[in-house]
Amino acid sequence: MTSVDRGVRERDAAGDAGSGAVRSTAAGSSAASGALAGVPDAASGQSDLAYARLRSAVLGLELRPGDRVSERGLEALAGASRTPVRAAMVRLEAQGLLRRDGRGWIVAPLDRDELDQAAEFREAVEGAAVRLAVGRIDLDELAALHALVDGEPGEPDELLGASRSFHSRLAAAGGNRFLADAVAAALARLERARWLEVRTAESRERSAAEHRAILAAVQAGEADEAERLVRAHARAARERTAAALAPDRTRGLHVT
Amino acid sequence: MTSVDRGVRERDAAGDAGSGAVRSTAAGSSAASGALAGVPDAASGQSDLAYARLRSAVLGLELRPGDRVSERGLEALAGASRTPVRAAMVRLEAQGLLRRDGRGWIVAPLDRDELDQAAEFREAVEGAAVRLAVGRIDLDELAALHALVDGEPGEPDELLGASRSFHSRLAAAGGNRFLADAVAAALARLERARWLEVRTAESRERSAAEHRAILAAVQAGEADEAERLVRAHARAARERTAAALAPDRTRGLHVT
DNA sequence: GATACCGTGGTGGTATACCAACTCGGGGGT
DNA sequence: ACCCCCGAGTTGGTATACCACCACGGTATC
């Protein structure tokens, strides 16, 4: 089961020594976090730092689905000691990115059935959110979304980020933060599987075209059409991703 | 503000003494906790016990919305020391029942706008979940739901529990655990406000009638009708609750 | 050679010690 | 009379010590 011990990265200030030490507390995410937009955030204390690093490691497949992880083994990766690491793990567990396995922890496995359910969930909540966004969205936000969909780049990871931003911001424009959070949570659940997707220029263009169509419908104030397009997009994205989860294309990743 | 210090209950084994000591691990709660009966209990470790007790205290308005709470002050109420209390608080924060206030903690305030959004969210996810339940639900579950709606009792707290069970189980019958969890989460968010609702026999009967109508539509396989009824029920429930949040009826509770 | 046993190392669970930052109130200054 | 300042107490944040439990591996026994 490839027990992950990852002594890889070392603690930032290894010496650090006794408890008190310097420890800057910091003002909080500050500039950096705002700039990163969709990304988890930089965060302030050791606890948020650990959370951000671990979340990033899980979503980026650096910690592979199904891997066993231990609190002490993650101290190095998280750059913090057990207490904040543990707090971060509890938060990640609530998001479904980590899971308890008996008394221990594992990185949440990729499970086809669960991914299907997450996609179904996404369809429902994003459809509802976008329906609300129609008529509520303001011109500034419309312009920002246009910039996102028109300028979608070619790099796979940039595409992932841009796509995530588009969907998150569009959902947030609905004005209901529960729906917006649910959309973000669903996207996070689906994100790891998308890394496996072979992103051909064709599928990239298809996705971008769907984004543009959705935005056009929102701008035109056509609620029914916008919701229909969003739901169709969610289903299409799931199908594209599902193909990448075919047994021979999982790149050595364990998929249930 | 009414800073909650609650020295009220004392830790189970006050003396306890040094670290090692006896401390039976396992059973945790042991005799003493079991004796407390009514208390949430049930859980295994100190951490789950603390979580259950604190969650119950928040949902039951024992800890009032807006109250400032401290980790050390909650040790007594939770029956555990800071570490498990803290873990429980992190979980409750993820559920929106606790909130950070500067460096400290407060019980999530009741906010009309937020309750409206939660109700809107509930409408979307429960509608979707029930739509899925139509055709998927099996006879045993149908029978169980019938037992719940037909026998709904008069006691306000029992009614609350029965209603919660009905909606949760119906949503779960849809087979999508994300939707089911979302419904449960939304209900939890709305639950505290329902305590303020003056539950007249009339509104009680109206709610029960709506439940029966929903179940009938589900049983009849009418997906559109079932979803429509569920959404209408969610809106109606929100309106009934909202009336109870009128400034003169909040029973001294702080509502934003 | 197979099997039962026991020690050892590692796991999460918990309690606690210590720290920096904050709050708030009293005392001394103007 | 007012205001400022400073100190005691409290808060969350963090690191760490210790526990019981468990999985694993070597060894001794049959």
Image (cartoon, coloured by chain):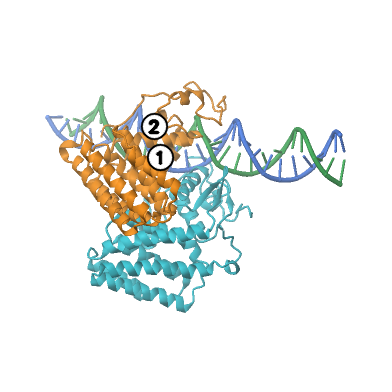
Chain colours: A cyan, B orange, C green, D blue
Callouts 2 and 1 in the same chain: yes
* Image quadrant assignment for residue A153: bottom left
- Please state if B67 lies on the left or on the right of A18 as rendered: left
Q: Which mark is residue B74?
A: 2
Is the Cβ of the residue at disc 2 closer than 8 Å to that at disc 1?
Answer: yes
The residue at 34%/37% (across/down) is B151
Query: Percent x, y for residue B147?
Result: 38, 40
Quadrant housing the C terminus of chain A:
bottom right
Q: Which mark is residue A83?
A: none
Residue lying at the far front of the rendered structure: B220
- Mark 2 or mark 1: whose residue is earlier in sequence: 2
Residue kind at label 1, given as amino acid type: Met
Q: Is residue A202 left or right of residue B114?
A: right
Residue A215 drawn at (x, y percent): 30, 71
Asked if residue B95 shows in the view, the reply is: no
Packing grade of label 1 (10 A; few <14, some 14-19, many >=20) is: many
Pointer 1 residue: B89
Residue B54 to residue B34: above or below: below
Sort mark 2 into few (<14), some (14-19) or many (20+) by Cα contacts within 10 Å.
many
Q: Nearer the viewer, residue D22 or C22?
A: D22
Residue B27 position, x and y percent, is 54, 30
A126 over B177 or under it: above or below = below
Question: What element does badge 1 sit on?
Answer: helix
Q: Name the residue rendered at 53%, 58% in the picture.
A: A111
Amino acid marked by disc 2:
Leu
Q: Is residue B227 above or below residue A144?
A: above
- Image quadrant containing the N terminus of chain A: bottom right
